[in-house]
Image: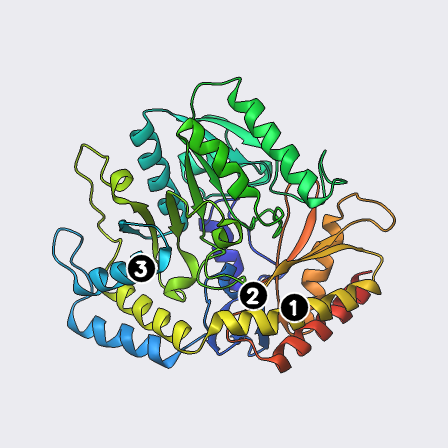
Amino acid sequence: MSGLYERHLAVSPEWLALYYRNPVELTHGEGRHVWDADGNRYLDFFGGILTTMTAHAVPEVTKAVAEQAGRIIHSSTLYLNRPMVEMAERIATLSGIPDARVFFTTSGTEANDTALLLATAYRRSNQILAMRNSYHGRSFSTVSITGNQAWSPTSLSPLQTLYVHGGVRTRGPYAELSDEAFIRACVADLEDLLGHTRNPAALIAEPIQGVGGFTSPPDGLFAAFREVLDRHGVLWISDEVQTGWGRTGEHFWGWQAHAENGPPDILTFAKGIGNGMSVGGVVARAEVMNCLDANSISTFGGSPVTMAASLANLSYLLEHDLQGNARRVGGLLIERLRSVAAASPAVREVRGRGLMIGIELAKPGTDEADPEAAAAVLEAARAGGLLIGKGGGHNTSVLRIAPPLTLTVAEAEEGAAILADALHAAG
């Protein structure tokens, strides 16, 4: 046990999880690689939980941070903040939400917490619809709507939450249906649920569930839900903390795979837009955003430094068409991983879009989760020089693969080869 690990255990909560039997201290990074305190070099396929979205040590971003820090680091939202206004203008336009207003926070948890505050105040209802297998953060309110037992440590809640089918395509009561029949069944479930309850404030949903193992419904499910929600006046909150900014390759936002009936009423974002800086936020149409009748500010949300980083990162992302790169290189990577998986009896499914890919593991010949295998593959991948994540909801074990969006074809091939060896070693 390293000295730093012992010190960590002495001062940290028992529930603050660390990856690996011998946890790793990352000291620096460049591009798609990071180094640990022992000098080992790793290909990074998890990006600090999908947060180092562009690359490590992007010169344009680090330069923007340094220059802004040399001028002023902090002022709060009580003062005009040019970088924050410029970033809000860009996000409002990109969001697809008409007459959009933007509020910045410091994390995805806080963004979702704010979205829940807006929706419940606007609708005067504390009832929330959420998806089974979902994850929305670690605050008291977001834990209470999270549909994943492993990440929901209390049943106490300021909200009444009802869970809807549809976030997981290949498990559950509708798994054997065709995509069209699956959507019809989920819509019927939603209609039935609304017939048994008071009017909810909102449905909150991840277009692709992150912590739940990169699961998703067929395209169009949330558009079909929207028709039902609109009849009841229920808002749609799209949690884009992990799916935003082009990571899925096919779309800039995850909701755009379900766009037939327009954009969401509220959109939340965080993680990758700051490329490691602490940035989150909420976009909503003005009528919803302006519904609060008491003062509200953010001490740290939209700080000059984090906004400078986000502006530089967003410009880099758009100028270098990283969404297109996610589509091209991600498409190659997922096909390569499906070829790898075909040789491993431990792999139940390879799924995902762009550079957001999940490998679900199960005990060979069954649908039973195999968390021991997931842990073993995680260790073997690290030993081979690759960092990946893991997740999964109800009785699932999933390897989570989400490299920075600048990933090259050669790096995709290298990572797939390491994963092939790791699956073989662990199996």
Res 394 label: none
Q: Residue furthest left?
A: 79
Foreground: disc 1 or disc 3: 3
When asked about the image quadrant of residue 151, the answer is top right
Up/down of 177 relative to 414, above or below: above
Q: What's the distance in space between the residues labelled 1 and 3, CA to CA?
A: 40 Å
Q: What's the distance in space between the residues labelled 3 and 2, CA to CA?
A: 40 Å
Q: Are marks 1 and 2 in contact (CB under 8 Å)?
A: yes
* Disc on the earlier residue, 3 or 2: 2
Q: Nearer the viewer, residue 37 or 264?
A: 264
Residue 375 in the figure: left or right of residue 311: right
Res 93 label: 3
Res 106 visible:
yes
- List x then y, in percent, for residue 400: 62, 58
- List x then y, in percent, for residue 86: 23, 64
Q: Residue at x 36, y 45 (%)?
A: 110
Q: Residue at x 22, y 39 (%)?
A: 290
* Disc on the earlier residue, 1 or 3: 3
Q: Residue at x 57, y 64 (%)?
A: 402
Report the number of numbered marks. Answer: 3
Q: What's the distance in space between the residues labelled 1 and 2, CA to CA?
A: 10 Å
Q: Nearer the viewer, residue 156 or 130?
A: 130
Badge 3 crowding class, 10 Å Cα cut-off, few under 14, some 14 to 19, many 20 or more, is few
Colouring: rainbow
Residue 375 in the figure: left or right of residue 249: right
* Disc on the earlier residue, 1 or 2: 2
On the image, numbered disc 1 is attached to which residue? 382
Q: Secondary structure at mark 1?
A: helix
Res 24 label: 2
- List x then y, in percent, for residue 275: 40, 67
Res 394 visible:
no
